[in-house]
């Protein structure tokens, strides 16, 4: 029981900034080649931003939205906006303008920060935005940025200069909503997920402890140099900017993701810790410039989609310490990591590749279960599959203003991920499919992810997506949409089929995979966060 005079300490985002693990005031925060500051200056800028917002009339509970690339300004918003008690809305800049309008309206944004690159989007919907009272321009390197129709009250840097660098941040209930962003589902308009101060602080502590306690592989520590390559609008760049700031490490924000700039920054700023979806790493490794850079100190967590063996092998050959992490927008996101123990590092190359591509072991404080349709737990034998359901202190309470989908997300007291997985005796999970991506061939399920993993290992294959297509006899059959590394030759198709059959013969793939069809495409459609868009591919090729 609390003594009546005891101070009731709340878990607030300001604690990550003001009571960090280490005070590294001279440590740097860098934005592309344009701007550098130290943590002392960063804290002053957070205070100035808080003063600016307060002067504009932003109150507790108001919503402040931002449309920007990954930048030091975004990091300032991660802190200042929730710290004054307002809600930060991270707008997905890759959505269509109608979807962006929907999210601004739905989140009831009061203030909007806009990088000049996105002025054309807002100009298209300007007359229909009802809630926003104040627009602030982020001019970046574009000194001539202006708009005839958007009534900007000023430019970010200019406005910040005018503010005091002192601010007393209030205390409030740790359960107050701190952030909101929208996830694009398979149907309908994007759904808003949201996180409280408590959830974000718990996620920072929980994921950081799990990530940092490994003796020699993949550990995120004080001497690292951090650069996100997962957009800051997507699940707070996996929450790692909060962890990086709490750790006090050097941080590098790359702006718009341009492969040459990313590679240059890794080299120049000596980046040692990043995270991204597989397609982005694949793109970076395909750039000729990558061969001139020493990547032997670069640790990369891959998440958001399954990590294939082919990508791991390619990355390891270049010296990158690559491993998978798993989570989703609704889970803040971290749930599991595929880090290697010291004993794993003594194993041969193939075994290590195997571990790195698993979905991983649950983090501390994460209760990860696999269940059948009746919520019975499925045995952890590395074979039996079921849906992953989860409990932990940092999962979204539901979808914003959406009772029906929230209740469906939280059925039977667990958050339902819709991911199908097995788990081995050592607690390693392996996702075999998403519920909506599984392929049912004549009554048998086959795993699209396993097929992709195998096809990807063929030397001619650059990228692949396996989807279910309609088949009169079998109901469904697998179609592999393949992007080749070189030009198409007739023999390649036969080779890929033969390569896949080898795995079927060895019993690694189900016999139903024999029905595989291959179709070569110049590229694969990607989602707004850069993942392969199976939903769109299914629509396009379903009746092929
Ligand atoms: P999002 O909400 O866009 O971040 O997507 C989350 C989904 O990405 C999850 O539900 C999984 O289906 C998928 N995903 C994330 N991490 C992994 C992983 N390591 N392996 C396989 N699928 C993953």
Image (cartoon, rainbow, N blue to C red):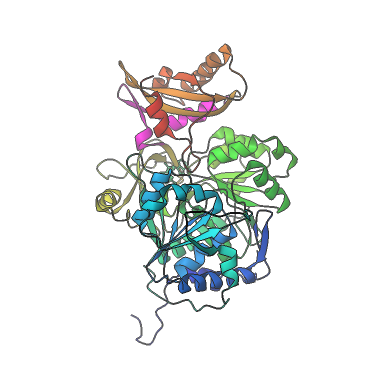
Tell me the quadrant of the picture where the C terminus can be found: top left
Which residue is nearer to you in this view: 471 or 317?
A: 471
Name the spot of residue 169 as percent of width and height, x first. 48, 76
Residue in the picture at 43% in, 18% down? 514
Residue, far bottom: 5
Residue range (magenta): 433-458
Q: Residue at x 44, y 27 (%)?
A: 466
361 and 437: which is toward the camera: 437
Is residue 461 placed above or below 272 in the rendered structure?
above
The image quadrant where one finds ligand 1 is top left
- Residue for point 31% across, 52% down: 414
Is residue 213 visible in this depiction of the protein? Answer: no
Give x and y (percent) for residue 449.
Answer: 45, 32
Q: Where's the N terminus, which quadrant?
A: bottom left
Which of 473/132 is in front?
132
In this view of the protein, which residue sits in the foreground, 438 or 350? 438
Residue 341 shown left or right of residue 396 in the figure: right
Residue 293 visible? The answer is: yes
Residue at the image position 30 percent from the left and 15 percent from the top:
473
Residue 345 drawn above or below residue 83: above
Q: Position of residue 433 (x, y in %)?
A: 40, 35
Outermost residue toward the right in this view: 292
Is residue 181 inside the magenta stretch?
Answer: no
Task: Tell me if residue 441 is in the magenta stretch.
Answer: yes
Q: Position of residue 181 (x, y in %)?
A: 41, 54
Where on the picture, by quarter, is residue 195? bottom left
**In the displayed structure image, the side of residue 348 where residue 515 appears, left or right:** left
């Amino acid at each position: 029981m609390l003594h009546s005079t005891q101070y009731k300490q709340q878990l607030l985002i300001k604690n990550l900034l003001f009571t960090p693990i280490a005070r590294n005031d001279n440590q740097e925060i860098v934005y592309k080649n344009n701007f550098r500051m130290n943590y002392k200056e960063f804290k002053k800028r957070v205070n100035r931003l808080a003063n600016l917002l307060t002067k504009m009339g932003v109150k507790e509970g108001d919503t402040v939205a931002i449309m920007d690339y990954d930048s030091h300004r975004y990091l300032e918003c991660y802190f200042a906006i929730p710290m004054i008690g307002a809600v930060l809305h991270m707008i997905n800049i890759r959505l269509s303008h109608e979807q962006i309008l929907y999210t601004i309206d739905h989140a009831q944004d009061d203030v909007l920060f806009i990088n000049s690159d996105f002025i054309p989007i807002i100009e298209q919907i300007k007359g229909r935005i009802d809630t926003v009272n104040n627009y602030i321009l982020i001019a970046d390197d574009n000194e001539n940025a202006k708009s005839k129709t958007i009534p900007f009250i000023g430019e970010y840097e200019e406005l910040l200069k005018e503010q005091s660098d002192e601010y007393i941040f209030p205390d409030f209930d740790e359960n107050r909503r701190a952030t909101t962003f929208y996830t694009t589902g398979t149907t309908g308009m994007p759904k808003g997920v949201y996180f409280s101060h408590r959830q974000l602080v718990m996620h920072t502590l929980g994921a950081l402890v799990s990530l940092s306690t490994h003796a020699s592989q993949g550990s995120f520590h004080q001497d690292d140099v951090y650069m996100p390559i997962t957009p800051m609008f997507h699940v707070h760049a996996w929450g790692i900017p909060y962890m990086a700031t709490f750790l006090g490490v050097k941080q590098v924000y790359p702006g718009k993701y341009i492969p040459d700039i990313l590679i240059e920054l890794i080299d120049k700023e000596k980046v040692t810790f990043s995270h991204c979806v597989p397609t982005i790493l694949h793109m970076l490794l395909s750039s000729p410039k990558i061969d001139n850079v020493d990547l032997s100190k670069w640790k990369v967590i891959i998440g958001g989609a399954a990590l294939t063996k082919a990508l791991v092998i390619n990355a390891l050959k270049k010296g990158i310490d690559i491993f998978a992490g798993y989570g989703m927008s609704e889970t803040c996101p971290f749930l599991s990591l595929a880090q290697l123990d010291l004993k794993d590092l003594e194993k041969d190359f193939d075994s290590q590749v195997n571990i790195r591509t698993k979905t991983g072991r649950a983090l501390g404080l994460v209760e990860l279960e696999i269940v059948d349709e009746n919520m019975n737990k499925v045995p952890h034998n590395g074979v039996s599959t079921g849906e992953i359901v989860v409990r932990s202190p940092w999962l979204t309470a539901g979808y914003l203003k959406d009772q029906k989908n929230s209740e469906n997300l939280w059925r039977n007291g667990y958050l339902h991920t819709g991911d199908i997985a097995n788990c081995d005796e050592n607690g390693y999970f392996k996702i075999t499919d998403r519920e909506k991506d599984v392929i049912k061939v004549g009554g048998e399920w086959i795993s699209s992810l396993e097929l992709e993993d195998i096809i990807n290992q063929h030397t001619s294959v650059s990228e692949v997506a396996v989807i279910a297509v309609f088949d009169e006899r079998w109901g469904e059959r697998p179609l592999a949409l393949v992007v080749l590394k070189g030009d198409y030759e007739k023999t390649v198709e036969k080779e890929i089929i033969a390569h896949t059959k080898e795995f079927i013969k060895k019993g690694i793939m189900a016999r139903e995979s024999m029905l595989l069809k291959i179709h070569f495409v110049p590229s694969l459609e990607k989602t707004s966060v850069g993942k392969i868009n199976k939903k769109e591919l299914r629509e396009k090729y379903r009746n092929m």
